[in-house]
Image: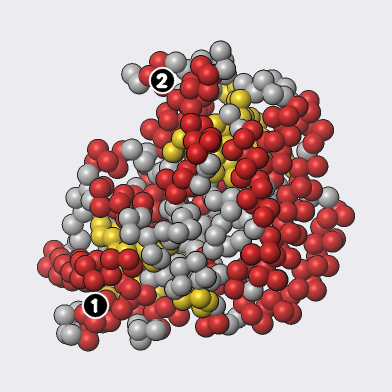
Amino acid sequence: MSEAMQEIDYKKRILFICNYYAPDSTIAAIRTTKIVKYLRQYGYEVDFLTVKNSSLSCDETLAREAESVKITYTQNSTTYVKLERLIKKALEPAKQKRMADLSNRNRVNPKTGHVEFYPFETAYPIVGSVEYIINIFKQKDLFHGIKNWIKKADSYDYMITSYGDAFCYYAGRYYHKIHPETKWIFDIRDSIYRYKFTPKYVCFIPKMIEKKVWKEADAIVGVSKGICGRVSSKYRDKVHLITNGYDLADRYEIKEEKLLSNKLVLTFTGSMYGGIQDLTPLFKALRELIDAGEIDINNIEAHFAGTASASKVFERQLSDYNLQTILRSHGKLDRYDTLKLQQKSDLLLCPAYDYENNREGMITGKFFEYMSAKRPILTIVTGDIKKSEIAEITRKCNIGVAYEQAHHESDYVGLKQFIMNAYLEKNEKGVVSYNPNGCEIKKYDYRNLTKHMIKVFNDISREGK
C-alpha cells in the first residue's frame, strides 16, 4: 500500500469548487468528476460547488458517477444576464464579420518573430478584451450569488478550486479568507494567463490572479510541467504536477465492435480552439503519399466529431491539401458515442501547440481520453518548443507517433513512415498494431492520479502541524 493510502483519514471532508462538473458534457468536467469519484472511493467525503450550466448538454455517464454527491449551485443574477445580453448584441456585428474570416488570423509574434495563427481573442484584441472583461464580471457575479453560503460552510478540512474560469478563484479566495483553517489546493487545469488567448489589453488581470494564488494557496496543482513552471520560484515548493488522465471504467459499457471501415480511418474528436490546433503537417504528409502512389485516396477516411465551428476549421485544413473528399463528419456527439467512435477507428488525431518563450504546457484532456481507446495516436505539435510534454508522453508510452514543428525534418519523415506502415497493416491484416508501454500508461489512470492528490493533502497537513 502506498504512503498516500496509508495516511488517509477517512473522516476528512473536502469542498471542491469549479465551473464544470457532472453532468456537464465538456472535457473540463471530466477531470473534476473523476477526481471526486476516486476521492470518495478512497474514503473522503466530498461536496461540490459549481455553476448551473443550463446551456451545456448532459453527459449521462458522468451524471451516474455523481449521483450521491452533494452539489450546490450558483447562477448569474437577472441584472447581469440583461447587461450581458445588451453588450453581446452590440458586439455581434463586428464579431461575426471577423469570426467568419479564418484566413485573416496570421500575425507576427513580436516575441518569437514567427508568423503564427492566432485565435479570435488575440487576433482582434479590442473586441477580445471587451469579451474578457464581460466574462470577469460574469464570474464575479456568480461568486456574489453564493457569497452568503460560503460564509456559513465552515466544516471542511480541504478545499480544491479547479481553474479555468475565475469563479472558482473568487469563491475559493473568499472561502480561504473567511475559513483560514481549511487548506486550499488551487488546481490549474487551464493556464490562468493564456499567452495565445488573453488579449494584450487585459493580460494584467490573469497575471495578477496568478500572483495572488501563488502567495495565498496552501498548495498549487498544475496539469503540465509548463503550467507548473509559470509559478514564481519563491513559491515553487507549493507546486505539484498532476496531469489529466483517463478512466477505463468509461469504456466498460462499450462493447467491442467492428471497425468503422475496411479503409484506414483517422479520427479527431474535440475542439480546434479557433484554428490554433493545426493538423496540416499530417494532411501534407498524407497528400504526398497519395501523390506518390503509396496510398490510394479511396482507401482512407478522416472522421470528425465536434462543433460546427471546429468542423469548419478541420475541413479547411483538409481542403488546403485537396483532401476534403475523405472527410466524414459526425457533428457533435454525446460522450458515449464519441468514445465509441474512437474505439472503432484505426488512428486518433491529437493536435497541440507549445511555445518555448511563452510556455503554457498545453496538453489537452482529449489526449488522455484517447489512451483508454487503445488505438495509436498521431500527436501533431505546432510551435517552436523543442521538447514538448505531449510528444514526450507519446513516445515514452509508445502509443503512436509524435511530430514537433521544431524538429520538422526528422519528425516529418517519421510521421510519413508511421502513416504508411499503418496503411499497409490495415490492408494486409485488417487492423493497425498497438503495443503501448503498460507501466507508463498506468501513471495517467485517474485512480492513480487521485492518489497523488491525496499525497498533496498529507503534505500540507504535515506542514501545518
Residue 322 picture location, percent across and down: 35, 86
* Location of mark 2 (residue): 5
For disc 1, the neighbor class at 10 Å (few under 14, some 14 to 19, many from 20) is: some
**Farthest residue in the right direction?**
79
Q: CA distance from mark 1 to mark 2?
A: 51 Å
16 left or right, relative to 303: right
Residue depicted at 86% across the width and 53% down the height: 78
User: In this rendering, is residue 235 above or below 223?
Assistant: above
**Farthest residue in the top direction?**
465
Residue 74 picture location, percent across and down: 75, 43
Can you tell which quarter of the image residue 121 is in?
bottom right
User: In this rendering, is residue 309 above or below 237?
Assistant: below
Q: Which mark is residue 385?
A: none
Quarter of the image that includes the C terminus: top right
What amino acid does circle 2 point to? Answer: Met
For disc 2, the neighbor class at 10 Å (few under 14, some 14 to 19, many from 20) is: some
332 left or right, relative to 99: left
Residue 388 picture location, percent across and down: 36, 55
Residue depicted at 66% across the width and 82% down the height: 97
**Farthest residue in the left direction?**
428
Q: Which mark is residue 299?
A: 1
Q: Nearer the viewer, residue 231 or 171?
A: 231
Q: Secondary structure at mark 1?
A: helix
Can you tell which quarter of the image residue 172 is in?
top right
What amino acid does circle 1 point to? Answer: Asn
Residue 276 picture location, percent across and down: 48, 68
Residue depicted at 48% across the width and 27% down the height: 456
User: In this rendering, is residue 433 above or below 90?
Assistant: above
Q: Give the mark nearest the N terminus, 1 or 2.
A: 2
How many marks on residues?
2
361 left or right, relative to 72: left
Residue depicted at 37% across the width and 39% down the height: 445
